[in-house]
Image (tube, helix red, strand yellow):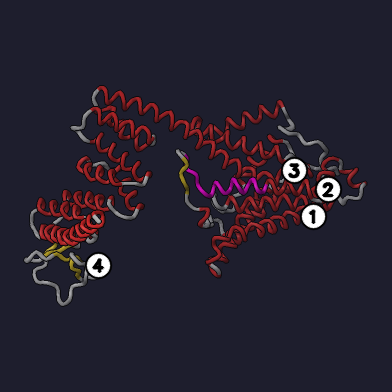
Amino acid sequence: MKRLVRAIALLVCMVIQGHLSQPAVADAVDDSLAGFASTSYADIEKAVAALAATGDPAATAILAALADGRLAYTADKAVFIKNEDGTLLTARTGEPLAGEAPFGLKPVKVNNKVRRAVDAAMGQLTLSSTDPAQRLASAEAAFHAPDPAQLAPIEAALAKETDPRIKTELEQARAAMILAKADASDNDKVAAIAILAARGDQDAKSFLNAAANQGSGRVAEAANAALAKIDRTLAMWSAAQSFYYGLSLGSVLLLAAIGLAITFGVMGVINMAHGEMVMLGAYTTFVVQEAIRNHAPFLFDYSLLIATPLAFLVAGGVGMAIERTVIRYLYGRPLETLLATFGLSLFLQQAVRSIFGPTNLEVGNPSWMSGAFDLGGLTLTYNRMWIIVFAFVVFTVLMLVLRRTSLGLQMRAVTQNRRMAAAMGIRTAWVDTLTFGLGSGVAGIAGVALSQIDNVSPNLGQSYIIDSFMVVVFGGVGNLWGTLVGALALGVANKVLEPVAGAVLGKIVVLVLLVLFIQRKPRGLFPQKGRAVES
């Protein structure tokens, strides 16, 4: 019985408190609004702080109007918000004002101190928001622009916060404010340095540098130790970022070179028009996206899935036509083949210029390939990540084609012994055509991927043809595993050397090392057994 009485009494107290608190908040809002009807900047600044302290839902709209110069008052201290269309809202309720505008309406005065007070008040309001995203954004803003005057609101929000990520951000904002506070104790500053050292990014370094230059001996020592730790951490993340860039570059080289490895390995043809097959794949992607933009915009996110098989068919068809009309008459004559395919590359470039123009064309990223995400200290872009995945998928499919299909069996037979394959009834001429078509089609697929990270222009293929030959020769002519290892090795080597030697010098160093390697192993990492095409 006693428990029941106590429970009822507690409930009554809560109800009474709730009814009493609402008028109290309303009175506080009214009092703060009256402070805006003043010509004193100091009174307006106090009114801003008082309004933010109420936590009233209307406070955000009122302060935003003040910051935009849309807050006005009358002689009887009634405050109104001006909309962009000229209509007036009652500041307290947000309801439209009925009738004509009040006589003698004056704008609330604003200067830089008032604007800073508004910014701080908006941060205080968002720190107590029910939306976690708003609280996180407010905490991040407080960290990047630490104001020691806002230390109390940050500590109050930190005491109430339950979300671990937001709590960490608030702790870091508090640490940045303590370092910016002139009268903070050395113990507090050393503790703040430890928190920022755990963050370990460039933003934290800027605060620690200031502490190292301006702090006392103990604070400066702690800041320097934290800076050394952050530098080591950032160096590790930088190396990991370079490796990721190298992996993505290697995947691009793999896509561009894998078709060349097939044609060069089986047929012994030095195809200087291989880069133009890549270009045709990129332009096919552009045509598909233009058709989707004009006729079916809702399919844009699927544009690359539609363009991939079409690019394979277009580039593969052009490659087969080139083999049947030009290259089949030049087998066993490598110099003439090189000159003929070089001429074909110029012809294809000029044809594309005549049809699409010489300027770069826009190929958009689908939503699932746009943006990036952070993984520790790494920034991973979605387009590069998907290209890495795509390159390994293409490599796996090609391996299955070569190992599990009759065409792959015939290609391997022709590679190992062309005359014996012909004696066994294999139509070696058609194997050559299909092989050339397969290699060109894969180059077209590479063009689909490259359109997401490079400019689509008539010169697109020329940017990758030399690197593709380097990959094929380094890995071993005609060996797909060698092409995979060679592409990734050259990609990573280029990106690791770039920060040290620069982009141009780094590429020169890679080329010199490759020449020295070829002198020792002229057939590459994984030499292919067999003979080239004979006349």
Instruction: Answer left or right for 237 relative to 281.
Output: left
Instruction: Answer left or right for 315 relative to 423.
Output: left
The tag earlier along the polypeptide, 2 or 1, is: 1
> Is 532 drawn above or below residue 319 in the view shown?
above
Which circle marks residue 84 in the picture?
A: 4
What is the three-letter code of the residue carrying label 3? Phe
Q: Residues within 10 Å of mark 3 (few under 14, many from 20)?
A: many
The secondary structure type at the circle numbered 2 is: helix
Residue 49, given in percent of the width and then of the height, sits at 16, 51
The tag earlier along the polypeptide, 1 or 4, is: 4
Could you say which quadrant of the image residue 130 lies in? Answer: bottom left
> Is 431 drawn above or below residue 216 in the view shown?
below
Between 455 and 355, the residue placed more toward the observer is: 455
Residue 47, given in percent of the width and then of the height, sits at 13, 54
The tag earlier along the polypeptide, 4 or 2, is: 4
Res 382 visible: yes
The residue that mark 3 highlights is 264
Residue 529 colored in magenta in the image: no
Distance from Cα at disc 3 to Cα at disc 2: 16 Å
Residue 380 colored in magenta in the image: yes
The residue that mark 2 highlights is 410
The tag earlier along the polypeptide, 3 or 4, is: 4
Q: How crowded is mark 4: few (under 14 residues within 10 Å), some or many (20 or more)?
A: few
The tag earlier along the polypeptide, 3 or 2, is: 3
Distance from Cα at disc 4 to Cα at disc 2: 74 Å
Between 287 and 142, the residue placed more toward the observer is: 142
